[in-house]
Amino acid sequence: MSLVPFHDRDGFIWMDGKLVPWRDAQVHVLTHGLHYASAVFEGERAYGGAIYKCTEHSARLRQSAELLDFEIPFSVAEIDAAKMATLKANGQTDAYVRPIAWRGSEMMGVSAQHNTIHLAIATWEWPSYFDPATKMKGIRLDIADYRRPDPATAPSTSKAAGLYMICTISKHRAEKKGYADALMFDWQGRVAECTGANVFFIKDGQVHTPLADCFLDGITRRTVIDLCRKRGFEVIERRIMPEELSSFNECFITGTAAEVTPVSEIGPYFYTPGNMSKTIMEDYTAEVTPKAAAA
Ligand SMILES: Cc1ncc(COP(=O)(O)O)c(C=O)c1O
């Protein structure tokens, strides 16, 4: 883990239309986004110089903002170009890409009708963790106390900063107990997702994953569903109850950061990462590898 704080690094951050030196990309302490969580973000990865599903991420960023009742003053094409410009300015090809949009400081109260909307994009080196032997050991998951919120209480399908409050608390509690992450149930007590990744299970050659109707329907989740179907693996999106956790043979999580990561334990339940997880992991690696680089 890097101990260099994120505010004190070399490089460039794209901010409101131009590249600025990394350390100058600052916001004022009286910023609506900070006080009222009026911020949305993306997490993306560049592989061999190409951002995987770049345009889908830009579109989701704009959609997340719309769900929070604000409009990002840049089009999807402009956001795509800005992300590439940031990677180029930082001389990176394999990197994590973090766009964030937030309400500024014109009004400081719950109402923010006249606040300007800002957009910043940072990129940093984060080589993908593709060592299959290590990954196949699987990670251990705790079961979180907090639940994914009812769509009637929060814009639960937005990648909104405020929704991560319970994720950080849950992940900290898990880490204190020695787990890598935590599985969260939804507001009705059904299996939902992890604090920053979606979850899949395997039983009798079929792939099962919770219906993504009250949490982020990850871009990796959808990619993996397609890859499974291309392989001829049946994928069933359905309600999954906690009582079923003991009945699955394999489990893995998916996300831009996690990619496809096998799971060996969830609380008292044990899984053995096997051939299907390995195949899906390898198919995902092939999928994100730029075709020219793979050839
Ligand atoms: C809460 C949550 N769920 C799921 C995901 C997976 O989404 P994606 O595959 O689009 O990265 C993420 C990662 O961004 C996340 O933060």
Image (cartoon, helix red, strand yellow):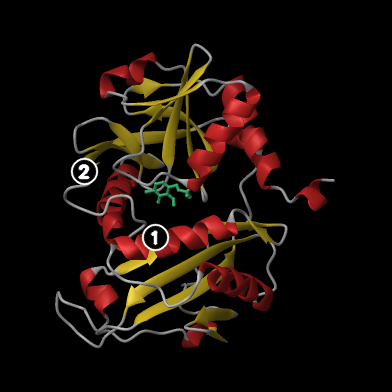
Residue type pointed to by label 2 = Tyr
Q: Is 52 placed above or below 68 here? A: above
In the depicted view, which residue is nearer to us: 239 or 36? 239
- Regarding residue 178, the answer to whether it shows in the image is no
Q: Residues under labels 1 and 2: Cα distance?
A: 25 Å
Q: Position of residue 156 (x, y in %)?
A: 28, 50
Q: Is 1 placed above or below 17 here? A: above
Seen at 58% across and 81% down, the residue is 12
- Regarding residue 9, the answer to whether it shows in the image is yes
In the depicted view, which residue is nearer to us: 163 or 128? 163
In the depicted view, which residue is nearer to us: 62 or 204? 62
* Residue that label 1 marks: 63
Q: Position of residue 18 (x, y in %)?
A: 55, 86
* Residue that label 2 marks: 146
Question: Where on the picture, by quarter, is residue 84?
Answer: bottom right
Which one is earlier in the sequence, the residue at label 1 or at label 2? Answer: 1
Q: Categorize mark 1 by other alpha carbons within 10 Å: few (<14), some (14-19), many (20+).
A: some
Residue type pointed to by label 1 = Gln
Seen at 33% across and 48% down, the residue is 171
